[in-house]
Amino acid sequence: MRVLEDDLFPSTPGKVKIERATAMNRQLHRCFASTSTMFLWALFLVAMTASYLSFQSFVDTSSKYFAASWGGLHWERQIRASAAPRRPPGSAAGAGMSVLVTGAAGFVGTHCSLALRKRGDGVVGIDNFNSYYDPSLKKARRSLLASHGVFVIEGDINDGRLLAKLFDVVPFTHVLHLAAQAGVRYAMENPASYVHSNIAGLVTLLEACKDADPQPAIVWASSSSVYGLNDKVPFTESDRTDQPASLYAATKKAGEEITHTYNHIYGLSITGLRFFTVYGPWGRPDMAYFSFTRNILQGKPITVYRGKNHVDLARDFTYIDDIVKGCLGSLDTAGKSTGTGGKKRGPAPYRIFNLGNTSPVTVPNLVSILEKHLRVKAKKNVVEMPGNGDVPFTHANISLARQQLGYKPTTNLDVGLKKFVKWYLSYYGYTRGSKNL
């Protein structure tokens, strides 16, 4: 038992405690060493994660930069070359303008850009090539413009950075603002697109213009739709426009109020043009004359709307060449903006004009003219006009435009539709009996 006791209870006091303490210290040391190692690994993983995220952000940013359809030295050279006026020195028409055309691949935008370039003005276009109607038609227009030395940027007028860059590269003297979400009936399907383009886009463009140095003069497309439910004819610029019949009309009316505000506060020279039912070659497929032509050639029925009490709808159809003359006349007579550094230095011009033909034609008469030029009889479904925002008639008083712009339309509907049909048959390669239009 003694040996066992000596083995169990050593003679040196505190020996067991010391050994136990040493063992505990070793365990604690191992624990702290393990914790420190884990901490270091955790720091390493955090650093690696942060590095990865930073690299991914860089890659994403770089991808967006390199994927952008604008920017770079070559792009800037293209912009400057397209914007440079080409009128001969000492020209009676002056040195020429440098014009930024929004919606340049659109119907009116293409024709105006071609006319400006033809007379020697510098032109740069911008268009977002949206899918409201077949983008291939817009791209064909862009190719046409490119063949005449007009460069069109694929971009959105809501992109403030892009607009600021354009004004930084070129001191544009004028802006012809034609970009918009068009169409009365489509507003019932996609109302947000009208606010995005016709209001937000307009404000973004005006912000870029008021900050530009020098500030450009602005000519922009309003619409005859602003007359809304007004039943006084012909429509005159001073008539009331506070009863819009569609969201499209409401956004155009809002545009007139917004542009007036920027004219008043920032000294921007503003000219608004109320277009009346523009038609002609390279037109918009959603317009009645265009879709009627397609359906008549394909042997499909067309829908002809009638107003209340079986009254035929009538429109003041205006040929594209006449509209172009009005647009260029507005640019030529636009006074200068008076602001610098975003501050107004004096009063600037604010004008609104009707651009129409002054000879309304009923829709059934339009169909008859198409039948004559297509040499095909239409299959017609005549129905009452639904409550979709359309108005029963339009009729422009153009006295003010005639007086101040020298505006004088010369193309009647019969002649204009003949030219349109010739273009349509050529562009779509129509042959008798074809169903592929």
Image (tube, helix red, strand yellow):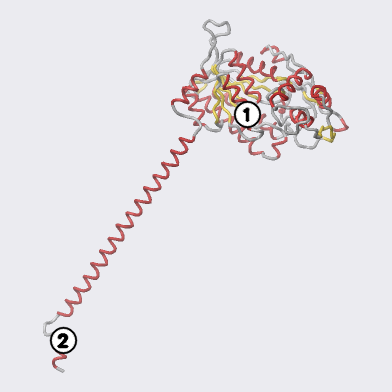
Residue 361 percent across, percent down from the top left: 81, 22
Left or right of 128, for residue 297: right
Instruction: Kindly identify the residue that appears in the image at 56 percent across and 19 percent down.
Output: 217
Q: Secondary structure at mark 2?
A: loop
Q: Nearer the viewer, residue 334 or 105?
A: 105
Instruction: Kindly identify the residue that appears in the image at 28 percent across and 64 percent down.
Output: 34
Q: Residue 176 occupies which quadrant of the picture?
A: top right
Q: Residue 306 occupies which quadrant of the picture?
A: top right
Residue 250 percent across, percent down from the top left: 68, 32
Q: How many numbered discs sit on the rendered protein? A: 2
Dot 2 amino acid type: Phe
Can residue 267 be seen by looking at this rendering?
no
Dot 1 amino acid type: Lys
- Above or below: residue 201 compared with residue 25: above
Instruction: Kindly identify the residue that appears in the image at 13 percent across and 85 percent down.
Output: 10
Task: Kindly identify which numbered label has been placed on residue 9.
Answer: 2
Do the residues bearing badges 2 and 1 touch, measured as CB atoms within 8 Å? no
- What residue is disc 1 on? 138
Instruction: Kindly identify the residue that appears in the image at 14 percent across and 79 percent down.
Output: 15
Instruction: Quarter of the image for the C terminus: give it.
Output: top right
- Above or below: residue 128 compared with residue 273: below
Q: Residue furthest right?
A: 309
Task: Kindly identify which numbered label has been placed on residue 203.
Answer: none
